Amino acid sequence: MGNCFHEFELNIAERALKHLIHKYIRSTSVMDREEQLKKIKRERARQKAREAREKKKQVELQKKTVEYQKKVNVNREAFGLKKNPIQNSINNYFKTPSSKTGKELATEQACKEPLT
């Protein structure tokens, strides 16, 4: 009976195999957990970066508004600095001839009147 395994030896081999399988499963689950943690950390970092970019865009957009530029000029005047020019509002580009201000109407009338 040279190549026959005894029942005792088979039980030991089965236990060893089960132990190796269990050890492998535990190690891969630990690796999976570590990979999941890394993935979660990456996602959080991406989300924070995305939020930071959006916030930065909002601040940049706000800085381009006329109200913000006026506030800056008030502060500059308080410190004795020269005002920065304020951007024209987009409404100025779409003015109709009937929406002229009193000053513009007065200059037009003055130009039309003949000089005596």
Image (cartoon, helix red, strand yellow):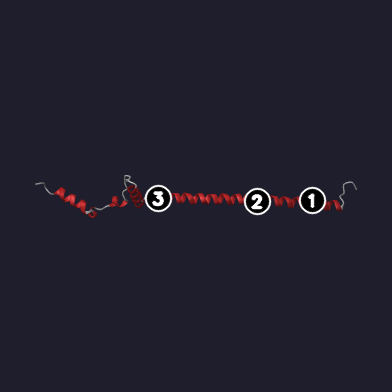
The mark lying in front, picked from 3 and 1, is 3
Q: Which residue is drawn at 42% across and 50% down?
A: 59
- Could you tell me the amino acid type at mark 3? Leu
Q: Which residue is drawn at 83% across and 52% down?
A: 10
Direction from residue 113 to residue 84 in the image, left or right: right
* Classed neighbour count for the residue bearing mark 1: other residues with Cα under 10 Å, few (<14), some (14–19), many (≥20): few
Direction from residue 2 to residue 49 in the image, left or right: left
Residue closest to the eye, 3 or 113: 113
Q: Which residue lies furthest to the front in this view?
A: 79
Residue closest to the eye, 74 or 18: 74
Image location of residue 98, percent across then percent down: 23, 55
Image location of residue 63, percent across then percent down: 38, 49
Could you tell me how many numbered marks the image carries? 3
- Could you tell me the amino acid type at mark 2? Asp
Q: Residue at x 43, y 49 (%)?
A: 57
Report, in whole angstroms, how far the alpha carbon at label 3 lies from the one at label 1.
Answer: 67 Å
Q: Find out whether the residues at labels 3 and 1 contact each other: C-beta distance under 8 Å.
A: no
Q: Mark 3 points at which residue?
A: 61
- Could you tell me the amino acid type at mark 1? Ala
Q: Name the residue under label 2.
A: 32
